Image (cartoon, coloured by chain):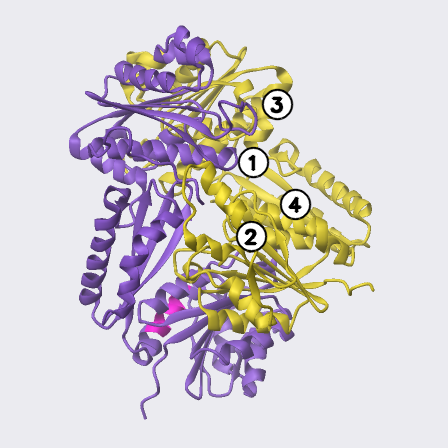
Chain colours: A yellow, B purple
Amino acid sequence: MTASPFRRAAILAIGSELLTPNRIDTNSLFVTSALNAIGIDVVFKAVAGDDRVELQALVAHALGRVDLVVLTGGLGPTDDDVTREVVAAHLGLPLAEDRTITDAIRRRFDARGWVMPEINRRQAMVPRGALVIANPNGTAPGLWIEHGTQGVLLVPGPPREMRPMVEQMVAERLLARADGRRVVRRVLKIAGRSESRVEELTQPVYSRWRALDTPVETTILAAPGQIELHLSARGNDAAGLDAVLDRAAGEIEAVLADDVFSSDGASIEEVVGALLLSRGWKIALAESCTGGLATSRLTDVSGSSAYVERGVVAYSNEAKIAMLGVGPDLITAFGAVSEPVAQSMAEGIRDRAKVDVGVGITGIAGPTGGTESKPVGMVCISVVTPPRTLVRTFRFPGNRELVKTFAAFTALDMVRRMILERVKGSEGVEANTSG
Amino acid sequence: MTASPFRRAAILAIGSELLTPNRIDTNSLFVTSALNAIGIDVVFKAVAGDDRVELQALVAHALGRVDLVVLTGGLGPTDDDVTREVVAAHLGLPLAEDRTITDAIRRRFDARGWVMPEINRRQAMVPRGALVIANPNGTAPGLWIEHGTQGVLLVPGPPREMRPMVEQMVAERLLARADGRRVVRRVLKIAGRSESRVEELTQPVYSRWRALDTPVETTILAAPGQIELHLSARGNDAAGLDAVLDRAAGEIEAVLADDVFSSDGASIEEVVGALLLSRGWKIALAESCTGGLATSRLTDVSGSSAYVERGVVAYSNEAKIAMLGVGPDLITAFGAVSEPVAQSMAEGIRDRAKVDVGVGITGIAGPTGGTESKPVGMVCISVVTPPRTLVRTFRFPGNRELVKTFAAFTALDMVRRMILERVKGSEGVEANTSG
């Protein structure tokens, strides 16, 4: 017997905290992406609290409307984790403890020298006939239940537990039950342009795509410092869809040129890391207002110890002088937030670390410390890769955290452009002040 | 006739873009906050696409469960804006054009020297008996429909249009229909304990609160390194609720003692910053595996330049030796990831920066670089505040980013405990490996 394909899905996120003004469900974005990739549409999503009655009502609503229901969260060991019991009761499936799960949970506690609390046994309760999905990153296993022609997937709420389990189930169970009309997506990441400028430049290009045999949908999204252009196409033939999106991405890159820094999902720190590795270059960073954020982002990449030699957070003038050799007279003459000081920081860290690329960042993250001539959000960034030196002044919008994020991103993008030798004269990098 | 009070609400966000992997409904957070403030609970929320059938089904579900339904979005002029028509049809209310709305929309276009497109007339269609809510920031008016004892509010999706309309309706209509039972919330943040251990220790305390005259609800949430205990109480008397939550928080703190680092929403970096300021102390950090993340977090706090003197990211052995004075023999004898090296890093940065508190962090963030005796996730952290020195070894779970997050958090928590002089002998900090 061939089961009918899954086409329509609903996602339910469970947790009372997700109904407060302080928390939001983001797991559904990952689940949507995984389902769309195999041609399953998400037709609605919902959030329920740790409330048996409301959750049961939503489960009933969902099972009345879709082929596949994915529930995230509410699988913890405590009394207020009700997902497992509500779904089992609604489907009329008795729960029984699975000792292999209990043992696995106990081993996780043992490994840390802790005793498993008795309440964790609740996580070993399995509805009859359910498939248990191992959780390498936590105690709550996932559950997959086939109910007539419908499927119900229960996964834990913490993203690092949820994600690999969803990926595994897509590969092992859902792909075989999808109808093959995949949605293929591509994300172009763009630096140094405002959202409205990207729209203005690309709209004449992407507006033509709707008339193609395989139409390409576009969405523009802004994040601090970077703009993302999301392209998607739908059809049966994955290779054909890829070709359509390759062509589309190519047309955008022809317009935006080096402002497109990634078309495969890579982050700016991954792109910079790959460039440094390809040149066999090492980098060292001297940060003031970004407080270590640029170095931290670079070291988010596995293997970054091969090219990140060191970083310095020189918050005080004394630290800039002692650790980077910035001249006290330079600080007196131009101020700590100035292009000469940024450049001296970049040169100082590069000389001391004996590396190829030096970076200096100094600015006013705010909300205090701004003046008429040096307002909050003003940041000077210098990148030195002899024989070339680049130094620029930006004015970033937003609060302290946003200014730090903009500045760290922009510094890494300047490193990218310097390595590619694509900074010409005094143009080059342009501050994205849209926000 | 006095209508029965609104106690239970549902929020529906409408828009196909909100069902893609790229966009998320955040309007519901604002609406939740506005409703909670007048004692109305949000018992579920949902997202529907621009799809008449699914939206109608969700509206029916919501009206079967709650007193008040708030719908955001889908009030635009185009064919795919279906909220107005679906709600009117479901409630059996005929739609008729309201010429005063058409005129107002036309004036908005006139003011820009534009001609109103005919499709904008759709935004002037009003269900019989509905109250029209003027929209000073856009063309789509809001609608308020009283349906028997229930209320249905339709507002546009753009936040700057939605927010003032919701605020106006809360003040003019909903407040009078709410029962005045506000919800007051408190968040306790806890370090150095697993989620299940916090549950085990606090459950005997908070389980008694359900029997109070003013019951206190609790939710436990885990984030890397920290556990949050959310308390909430509901009633008419805001000062009384505060007193109840003060008492409840006090009972938890009596059990968890110094593991509670915040009861007012402050982050660990804010707590550490305030402690440093109160002592008039300065801090300097030497990081390896965290790559600057601990320093960056400390400098997320406005005014942190008053106490963060400097940071060093000593990724290479050469940097540890040159910038921190770590002995090459120490690295050879114990390895770069070891307690003696962590302590030497903390002492080195403290001496060089001439500050009160020195921090050293060295570990294996992974996914590569682990060995049998020094596995991925092993991190040595030292905090030096003469005459006391603390050094600990942890094994953090998860991927590279998570190990960095755990380690940075734990280092800041160790600083907190050292300043409070609450680390005793070899016990003290315990790694939180739950999640």
Is A259 colored magenta in this rendering? no
Main SS class of the magenta portion in the image: helix
Residue denoted by label 2: A99
Which labelled disc corresponds to residue A191? 1
Residue denoted by label 4: A202
Label 3 environment density (alpha carbons within 10 Å; few <14, some 14–19, many ≥20): some
Give the chain of mark 4.
A
Of discs 2 and 1, which sits in the foreground? 2
- Which residue is nearer to you in this view: B342 or A24? B342
Q: Amino acid at mark 4?
A: Thr
Q: Tell me the CA gap for discs 4 and 1.
A: 14 Å
Of discs 3 and 4, which sits in the foreground? 3
Mark closer to the chain start, 2 or 1: 2
Residue denoted by label 3: A275
Q: Quadrant of residue A258?
A: top right
Which labelled disc corresponds to residue A412? none
Q: Amino acid at mark 2?
A: Arg
